[in-house]
Image (cartoon, grey):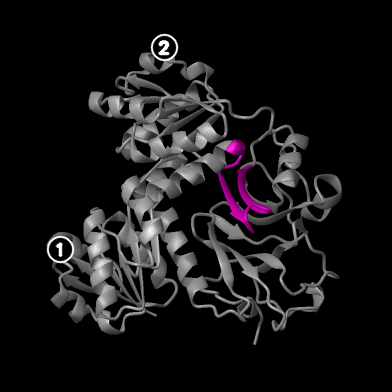
């Protein structure tokens, strides 16, 4: 596909980098000369320096573009760029919309404005954090088939009951309704077979229904109690949106914010939350405001370094769950040295959702195509949710007889409202939703999983 990206900040860069893995033809429009130079030297894309004027959009090829993505920091610029791009001939447009008022308006006016999709990174990040807090033992939780199946990433500690369990015995000894789908050990990622033995320090992903996953963690003593109180550091848009999500879950929320005006605005917008005006860099303040009694801390300041320091402090104070927002890739790598295992990158999450939309957009009504895409193990593997049509060659064939590509695993099947882990004798039926784990990138149809 020919794709134009307007704006190459963190989000635009993350989108471009992810879409390059899909082998798309990408042109980036960026007004800042230094940023434009950085993008042109770090990514294999065409870069046009300047504002997204009609002339520059024409030069970028908007007339025959399959998709235009506007990802600048300005909602107005994004909406105008999409409207102009659509008028020039772009088939589809996606706008980043940060202001909640605009976002709600776009849900109503999307068709009138010719907008294919509006996406709010803060809302997307907040939903991801809320899912993690619902399963606090997890480092990541991703839904499939409207939540009927979930993928959970989990770090095996030295005292875990999963230590020394051989995967061929997992179904009989641990859970028949959950499957270990990836295993990271010593920096290497594997899609493991039954011969693997789980060890302390392994990072694994598991797939199953929410009920089965909950039962698994309870069985191994990891799910002792649900999160009831959360402390958020930083009163950002993500914090505001996350508080709304937590309120629905009946979780008490404390927000610590050092800007007085922002505190006043948060108190007006979130009467159910406790808003504290103060500097979170002072450990005594956090302790006085209930850090030691909270079930989880979420570090959401604008500084990656501060978020890591606060997360490290919370871990030293034995806070049961710590979630850390990070923007820069080098800090994600540094987080491992701090022992911070649950991190979220809003730009990467948003880029993944846009990639999912693009793959689904390429499917026709009779194609067994991707409806859900989730990145696993920091993007080194993919979890794909397919909806299977009657015409697919995989229908009715026992899984043991399917000629799957190497490093492809059929992890779960959702049939009606039931999620189950299939065995070799099971076969996929029309209208099934199938969760597949693979290290191959760019797959759009379930037929892509098969060898030629």
CB atoms of marks 1 and 2 within 8 Å: no
- Give how far across and how far down residue 175 sits, in percent: 80, 47
- Relative placement, left or right, of 337 versus 31 is right
Q: Which quarter of the image is occupied by the N terminus?
A: bottom left
Q: Tell me: 226 left or right of 166.
A: left
User: Magenta residues?
Assistant: 134-155
Q: Is residue 28 above or below residue 64?
A: above
Q: Which residue is mark 1?
A: 31
Is 256 on the left-hand or right-hand side of 296? left
Q: Is residue 66 magenta?
A: no
Q: Which residue is mark 2?
A: 288
Quadrant location of residue 351? bottom left
Q: Secondary structure at mark 2?
A: helix
Q: Is residue 136 magenta?
A: yes
Could you tell me residue 253's position as x and y percent? Answer: 47, 26
User: At which x and y percent is residue 171?
Assistant: 82, 52
Q: In this rendering, would 344 be left or right of 377? A: left
Circle on res. 424: none
Whether residue 102 is visible to the viewer of this picture, yes or no, is yes
Image point (40%, 43%), residue name: 334
Q: Nearer the viewer, residue 153 or 102?
A: 102
| Whether residue 267 is situated above or below residue 203 in the rendered picture | above
Between 292 and 415, the one nearer to me in the picture: 415
Q: Is residue 7 visible?
A: no
Mark 2 crowd level (few <14, some 14–19, many ≥20, 10 Å Cα): few
Residue 420 location, quadrant: bottom right
First in residue order: circle 1 vs circle 2: 1
Q: Residues within 10 Å of mark 1 (few under 14, many from 20)?
A: some
Q: Residue at x 69, y 82 (%)?
A: 392
């Amino acid at each position: 596909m020919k794709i134009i990206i307007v704006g190459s900040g963190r989000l635009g860069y993350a989108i471009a980098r992810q879409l390059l893995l899909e082998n798309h033809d990408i042109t980036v429009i960026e007004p800042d000369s230094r940023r434009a130079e950085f993008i042109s030297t770090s990514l294999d894309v065409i870069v046009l320096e300047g504002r997204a004027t009609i002339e520059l959009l024409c030069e970028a090829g908007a007339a025959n573009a399959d998709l235009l993505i506007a990802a600048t920091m300005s909602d107005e610029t994004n909406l105008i760029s999409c409207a102009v791009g659509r008028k020039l001939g772009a088939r589809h447009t996606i706008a980043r919309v940060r202001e909640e008022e605009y976002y709600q308006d776009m849900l109503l006016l999307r068709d009138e404005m010719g907008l294919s999709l509006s996406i709010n990174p803060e809302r997307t990040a907040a939903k991801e954090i809320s899912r993690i807090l619902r399963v606090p033992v997890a480092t990541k939780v991703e839904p499939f088939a409207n939540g009927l199946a979930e993928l959970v990433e989990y770090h095996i500690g030295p005292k875990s009951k999963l230590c020394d369990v051989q995967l061929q015995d997992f179904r009989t000894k641990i859970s028949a309704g959950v499957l270990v789908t990836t295993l990271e050990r010593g920096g290497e990622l594997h899609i493991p077979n039954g011969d693997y033995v789980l060890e302390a320090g392994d990072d694994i992903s598991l797939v199953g229904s929410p009920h089965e996953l909950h039962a698994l963690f309870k069985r191994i003593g990891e799910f002792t109690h649900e999160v009831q109180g959360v402390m958020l550091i930083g009163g950002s848009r993500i914090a505001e949106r996350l508080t709304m999500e937590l309120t629905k879950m009946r979780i008490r929320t404390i927000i610590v914010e050092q800007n007085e005006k922002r505190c006043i605005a948060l108190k007006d917008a979130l009467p159910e939350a406790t808003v504290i005006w103060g500097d979170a860099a002072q450990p005594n303040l956090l302790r006085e405001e209930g850090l030691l009694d909270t079930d989880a801390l979420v570090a959401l300041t604008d500084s990656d370094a501060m978020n890591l320091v606060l997360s490290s402090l919370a871990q030293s104070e034995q806070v049961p769950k710590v979630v850390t927002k990070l923007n820069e890739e080098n800090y994600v790598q540094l987080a491992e040295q701090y022992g911070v295992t649950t991190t979220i990158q809003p730009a990467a999450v948003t880029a993944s959702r846009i990639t999912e939309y693009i793959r689904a957009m390429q499917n026709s009504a009779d194609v067994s195509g991707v409806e859900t895409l989730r990145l696993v193990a920091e993007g080194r593997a993919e979890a794909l949710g397919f909806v299977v049509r009657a015409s697919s060659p995989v229908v009715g064939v026992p899984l043991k007889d399917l000629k799957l590509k190497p490093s492809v695993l059929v992890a779960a099947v959702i049939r009606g409202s039931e999620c189950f882990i299939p065995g070799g004798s099971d076969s996929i039926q029309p209208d099934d939703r199938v969760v597949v784990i693979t290290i191959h990138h760019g797959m759009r149809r379930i037929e892509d999983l098969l060898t030629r």
